[in-house]
């Protein structure tokens, strides 16, 4: 069994950016990243292939829950 290596905790600008899971309705593709609350700009952080990738992203940035955007 493979073990995931411990992820290093990273910070982001909580004042100006909010974490978003961008989902495609057509093909189900999911991308985790941050959206600027003032400009609407999306900054992609990682492509989500499975629930393990999503958990790793949440743990990496200390995010309790993630809003979805279609």
Image: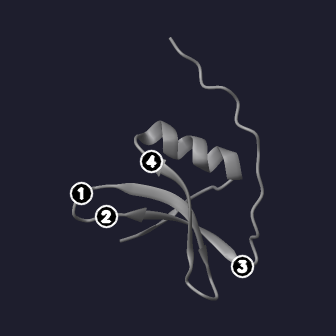
Furthest residue in direction bottom, as rendered: 38
Q: How is the image coloured?
A: one colour
Q: Nearer the viewer, residue 65 or 49?
A: 49
Which image quadrant for residue 9? top right
Left or right position of 1 against 16 = left
Q: Which residue does the numbered mark 4 point to in the structure image?
A: 48
Return the disc, 4 or 2, that comes first in the chain's sequence.
Answer: 2
Q: Residues within 10 Å of mark 2 (few under 14, many from 20)?
A: few
Q: Earlier in the sequence, mark 3 or mark 4?
A: 3
Classed neighbour count for the residue bearing mark 1: other residues with Cα under 10 Å, few (<14), some (14–19), many (≥20): few
Q: Give the CA separation, mark 3 to mark 1.
A: 30 Å
Q: CA distance from mark 3 to mark 4?
A: 23 Å
Residue 68 image point, x, y percent: 44, 66
Placement of 68 over or under 28, stated as above or below: below
Residue under circle 2?
24
The residue at the point 75 percent across, 63 percent down is 12
Drawn side of residue 31 relative to residue 14, left or right: left
Q: Earlier in the sequence, mark 3 or mark 1?
A: 3
Measuring from the top left, give residue 54's x and y in whole percent.
Answer: 50, 46
- How crowded pointer 3 is (Cα within 10 Å; few <14, some 14-19, many 20+) is rated as few
Residue at the (55%, 83%) spot, across then down: 40
Which residue is the extreme one toward the left?
26
State the separation of the CA atoms marked 2 and 3.
24 Å
Q: Which residue is mark 3?
A: 16
Snapshot quadrant of residue 63: bottom right
Residue at image point 66% right, 26% down: 5
Secondary structure under tag 1 reads: loop
Give the quarter of the image for residue 42.
bottom right
The residue at which mark 1 appears reads as 27
Mark 1 and mark 2: Cα distance apart in space: 6 Å
Question: Looking at the image, is 66 positioned above or below residue 42?
Answer: above
3D distance between C-alphas at marks 4 and 2: 12 Å
């Amino acid at each position: 069994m493979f073990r995931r290596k411990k992820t290093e905790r990273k910070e982001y600008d909580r004042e100006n950016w909010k974490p978003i899971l961008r989902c495609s309705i057509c093909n189900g593709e999911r991308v985790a990243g941050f959206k600027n609350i003032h400009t609407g700009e999306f900054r992609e952080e990682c492509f989500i292939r499975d629930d393990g990738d999503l958990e790793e992203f949440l743990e990496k940035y200390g995010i309790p829950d993630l809003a979805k955007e279609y």
